[in-house]
Image (tube, helix red, strand yellow):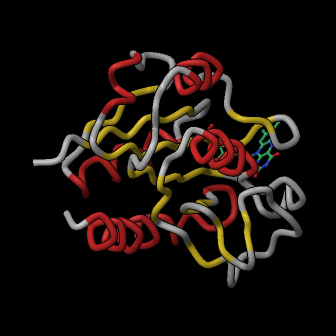
Amino acid sequence: MADIKVIFGSTTGNTENAANIIAKELGGKAISAADARPEDFNADILILGSSTWGVGEIQDDWIGGLAMLNDCDLKDKIVALFGEGDQMGFGDTFVDAVGTLYQKVTERGAKVIGRWSAEGYKHGSSTAEINGEFVGLALDEDNESELTFERIRKWCGRLKSEAGL
Ligand SMILES: Cc1cc2nc3c(=O)[nH]c(=O)nc-3n(C[C@H](O)[C@H](O)[C@H](O)COP(=O)(O)O)c2cc1C
């Protein structure tokens, strides 16, 4: 069985809840980025999540985690990304932390799976969006909490087929 780690940064618990659901759906383990050890980043499949704070900043628990990612060889590693944001309140930096994670892992050679259509979202711009798609799952507890569970379920189904799980 593949070793799947879901590493998340969360301040008020929204990304943590999403991480726990994702871990359950995929049979993986959810770990706070604040508690992650370097070996956690060696999992067969890495699922990284963060909420966005400030104006487009990655959540604070990721500060150490980003440094650990710098020391990882992610060449050809399967990575999927997700994040929580607020498309109405922060429409110009919606889920930008996912864009930050994307930049970091692709620089290190990762193969990112689990892109997600940006159709239907009402944000203006996001560093996590490329050609009408988010580079990972965009969740918005502040405005669309009723969609979260179904979005996660659907996304996890796609990850399973893309990663051959
Ligand atoms: C002060 C503040 C700044 C925020 N900045 C952003 C932002 O730049 N972009 C965004 O998409 N969401 C932003 N948000 C929304 C949070 O990311 C959102 O509430 C998220 O669900 C929090 O998740 P967490 O509980 O996992 O930390 C901000 C929220 C607050 C209160």
The residue that appears at 41% across and 69% down in the rendered structure is 155
The outermost residue toward the left is 1
Foreground of the two, 79 or 86: 79
Foreground of the two, 33 or 17: 33
The residue that appears at 69% across and 52% down in the rendered structure is 85
The residue that appears at 61% across and 78% down in the rendered structure is 117
- Could you tell me residue 146's position as x and y percent? 52, 69
Would residue 38 be found to the left or right of residue 43 on screen? right
Would residue 108 be found to the left or right of residue 31 on screen? right
- Could you tell me residue 144's position as x and y percent? 62, 68
- Could you tell me residue 151's position as x and y percent? 46, 71
Count of number-bearing discs:
0
The residue that appears at 52% across and 71% down in the rendered structure is 147
The outermost residue toward the bottom is 119
Point out the quarter of the image occupied by ligand 1: top right
Question: Which image quarter: residue 152?
Answer: bottom left
Would residue 35 be found to the left or right of residue 105 on screen? left
Above or below for 148 versus 76? below
Would residue 9 be found to the left or right of residue 149 on screen? right
Above or below for 99 versus 61? below
- Could you tell me residue 92's position as x and y percent? 90, 59
Quadrant holding the C terminus? bottom left
Foreground of the two, 106 or 160: 106
